[in-house]
Image: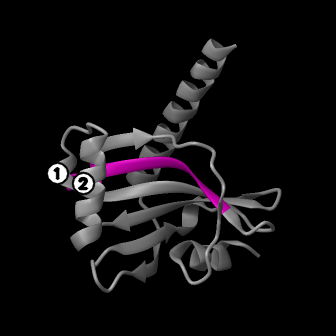
């Protein structure tokens, strides 16, 4: 049973990777969510990736790291033994928002270098988090949930 689950997880990661790269090839329609005034980190969502089903929305968020936030992410990738972590430029997160419950979860993380090469691809746990008011996720929820 666990080997079947491992195979399904590999298929999921490969499928999501292909989906991400197909979006990169065909272009994105990024919409700015916010810019952190202190670090310069800029948050976008890709409006072409919004998928709705059963009160939930999946959407890709792109983060162009800056300042202290860049340093924190580079340090985290270093702790994860990600090769080339010092070349980090931006990340994409597949986010699932439960519009009714006002919760969300990260489904995939992908970190990229300055040339668009993949540094890290990770499928985090299925952990569900509450959406905190006046955050980037709250802004995203207000845009994609209707």
Query: Picture quarter containing residue 137?
Result: bottom right
Residue holding disc 2 = 74
User: Which residue was labeled with disc 1?
Assistant: 86
Q: Residue at x 48, y 63 (%)?
A: 61
Image color mode = one colour
Q: Nearer the viewer, residue 96 or 46?
A: 96
Q: Nearer the viewer, residue 21 or 89?
A: 89
Give the residues drawn in magenta, as a range: 104-117
Magenta stretch: helix, strand or loop mostly: strand
- Which residue is outermost to the front? 79
Residue 66, visible in the rendered structure: no
Q: Which label was assigned to residue 113?
A: none
Examine the image and state in which quarter residue 84 appears. Answer: top left
Looking at the rendered image, the quarter that the N terminus falls into is top right
Q: Quadrant of residue 36?
A: bottom left
Question: Where, quadrant-wise, is the C terminus in this rendering?
Answer: bottom right
Residue 87 appears in the picture as rendered: yes
> Label 1 crowding class (10 Å Cα cut-off): few <14, some 14-19, many 20+?
some
Mark 1–mark 2 distance (CA, rounded to whole Å): 6 Å
Side (left or right) of 94 relative to 22: right
In the rendered image, the vertical position of residue 71 relative to residue 19, given as above or below: below
Left or right for 137, reference 78: right
Residue at 52% in and 40% down: 16
Asked if the magenta segment contains residue 105, the reply would be yes
Q: Earlier in the sequence, mark 1 or mark 2?
A: 2
The residue that appears at 63% across and 49% down in the rendered structure is: 127
Q: Are marks 1 and 2 in contact (CB under 8 Å)?
A: yes
x, y percent for residue 132: 61, 75
């Amino acid at each position: 049973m666990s080997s079947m689950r491992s195979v399904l997880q590999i298929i999921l990661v490969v499928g999501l990777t292909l989906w991400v790269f197909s979006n990169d090839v065909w272009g994105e329609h990024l919409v700015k969510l916010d810019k952190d005034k202190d670090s310069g980190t800029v948050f976008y969502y890709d409006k072409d990736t919004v998928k709705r089903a059963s009160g939930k929305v999946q959407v890709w968020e792109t983060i162009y790291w800056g300042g202290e936030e860049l340093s924190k992410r580079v340090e985290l990738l270093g702790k994860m033994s990600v090769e080339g972590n010092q070349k980090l430029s931006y990340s994409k997160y597949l986010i699932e928002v439960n519009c009714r419950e006002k919760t969300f979860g990260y489904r995939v993380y992908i970190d990229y270098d300055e040339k668009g090469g993949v540094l890290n691809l990770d499928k985090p746990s299925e952990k569900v988090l509450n959406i905190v008011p006046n955050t980037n996720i709250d802004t995203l929820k207000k845009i994609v949930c209707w």
